[in-house]
Amino acid sequence: MKTLLVERKDSIVIFHLHRPSCLNAVNVKMLDELQQQFEQLQADETVKGILLTGAEGHFAAGVDLQEIRHFTPLEAISFAERGQQLCSLIERFPRPVLAAVSGYALGAGLELALACDYILADKTAQFGFRELCYGVLPAFGGTQRLPRLIGKARAKELLFTGNVVSAEEALRIGLVNQLFPQESLQEDVLQQLQKICNYGLLSLQMGKEVIDTGYDINLPAACKMERDAFAVCFSTDDQKEGMSAFIEKRKPRFTGK
């Protein structure tokens, strides 16, 4: 692959966005390689979680303007659809996907991070949408995911002003969940992801689906969906093992069945 570095640690796959000559700017090749990887991993039951991060000190500093600047409107639609399809694929991935951000996460880079389950960062991280400065808009779902995360007014402020916010400000407004030291960011996020992946995989998958699906429907319907997912858990070996292990005061041995 030309735009990604991939490594695996036990049941976790780590994707490093890797275009160091342009601060990992997102281009068509990166979208295609990420989509191919996420599609392949959906069916791989040995993969319990994914960590998305950047190489060379940055997550991704927006879209590659050199590549898209001369697009026709039809080419722009195709590019936006590619990005939206990828972000939807990341968002719907059946296992946890965390973003670990150092340095810039701007424009399309921020949109990729927003598609993950949540964002963790170090104090060098900087976030923003600079698209209005270039006469365009975010195109991979950023105008929709950001207000759902931090509220409509704050999202409009970031988009309208083009301001780049610090890691501390991103934490304060709820864009980032936690900050870690720069030197141990990947190790700390990986440790958190490994802890998550040690739980029952089926209940974890259902929990993710219930939160994501229920967020955009009315509360009574969402609660019924939660009730049904809870009931389904009682047909699994993981439920029996988890509760037995607690009662017997031992560590559970989940099998994902």
Image (cartoon, rainbow, N blue to C red):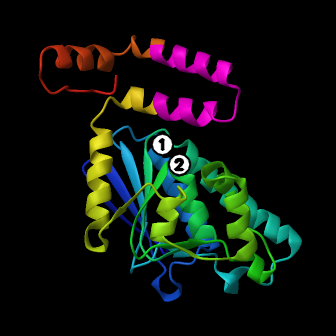
Quarter of the picture containing the C terminus is top left
Residue 17 in the image: x percent, y percent? 46, 70
Which residue is drawn at the image coordinates 31% and 64% (left, top)? 186
Which residue is drawn at the image coordinates 36% and 15% (left, top)? 236
Whether 218 is among the magenta residues is yes
Q: Which residue is mark 1?
A: 42
The answer to whether one can see residue 205 in this image is yes
Helix, strand, or loop for circle 2?
A: helix
Q: What's the amino acid at mark 2? A: Glu
Disc ID at residue 173: none
Q: Which residue is mark 2?
A: 39
Whether 95 is among the magenta residues is no
- Say if 20 sits above or below 166 in the image: below
Helix, strand, or loop for circle 1?
A: helix
Residue 49 in the image: x percent, y percent? 38, 46
Between residue 250 and residue 159, name the one nearer to us: 159
Start-end of magenta stretch: 206-230
Between residue 111 and residue 47, name the one nearer to us: 111
Residue 73 in the image: x percent, y percent? 87, 71
